[in-house]
Amino acid sequence: MEYFAQLMSSYIDDESTLRLLFSLIVGLAVFVALASVSVLVKAVSRPMRRRLAGIHSIDADHAARELAHTHRAKSASSFSKSFDHVAKYVAPTNETEVDATRATLIQAGFREEGAFKVFYALKTVSCLVFGALALIVIQYFPEYSANESIMRIGLAAGAGLMLPNFVLSKLAARRSNRVRKGFPDALDLFVVCVESGLGLAATIQRVGNEMEVSHPELAEELSLVTAEMRLGVDRIVALRGLAERTQLDEIKGLVALLDQSARFGTGIAQTLRVYADEFRDKRMQAAEEIAAKIGTKMIFPLTFFIWPSFFVVMVGPAVLGALTAFR
């Protein structure tokens, strides 16, 4: 703390301004600490409210998932309310950035109302924590000048500010990959259900129920589509929302084909069968492409790891024998 006060005094000569700035920084740190403690206390002291949130679930098979979703929503809501006053200062006002961030949050599976505020609150806390850690660590390097110390503290704070974005993008990519892996099985189930006489809405609900264990992320997305159609949303609009949430080309192609089928009056079963065959061919071509690249990729481990070991084993004894003979 004394080092930080000396660092500030090297740039600010007025003692009253220095005291005011120091008090503001201490007050901000105390506010963040108290807000974190209040969130933890609320989460621990209200277990009954979290448990009652799952009673309104209609389907008994979805009770556990609804309880977990409600618990996460309650936690995010209470956390976001604690940072409402901070979020309006740190959250962006640019609509493009806001829409992009919300889309990434939805793609990562965070659909709660306060997820946007929580994300920027975490960015603020991460920035302050990284800056504080850099301030603590830099005290062990007295050879740094004041400008160098401030530069390193700023870099650490910037790294803390960008870390949540990196983590969020990785979570979104991982969830999209899981949805992509479950799509071929879901597409085959779509074909089977439609050809057996089920309608599109019933097919989506049945496939979502069947995919809960093997691919829960895709099952969650299909359950959301089913809920939207039950509320009166057009099925094509609900499927377009699925494509926008997942941002997968495979699902976008399926939605486009179903839209054309609804417009021109063609059979859904035939459309799904054709798309399943085309998608199976694309998967085979992608697998063949990966297999064709293996030979090129094996050059580097062969050159740097396997061949040197081979030469040492095969040529090494001959080289040692020749050196012994020349001696």
Image: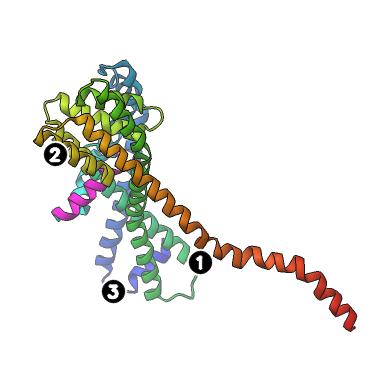
Task: Residue 44: give x, y in percent of width and height.
Answer: 37, 29
Q: Which mark is residue 140?
A: 1
Q: Would you name the residue on which mark 2 appears?
A: 260
Crowdedness near tag 1: few (<14), some (14–19) or many (≥20) residues, C-alpha within 10 Å: few
Marks 2 and 3 sit apart, C-alpha to C-alpha, by 72 Å
Q: Amino acid at mark 1?
A: Tyr
State yes or no: discs 1 and 2 in contact (Cβ < 8 Å).
no
Residue 248 visible: no
Q: Amino acid at mark 2?
A: Gln
- Magenta part of the chain: 95-109
Sequence-earlier tag: 2 or 3: 3
Q: Would you name the residue on which mark 3 appears?
A: 13
Q: Residue at x 35, y 44 (%)?
A: 281
Nearest the viewer among 297 and 75 is 297
Element type where label 2 sits in the image? helix
| Number of numbered tags placed on the structure image | 3
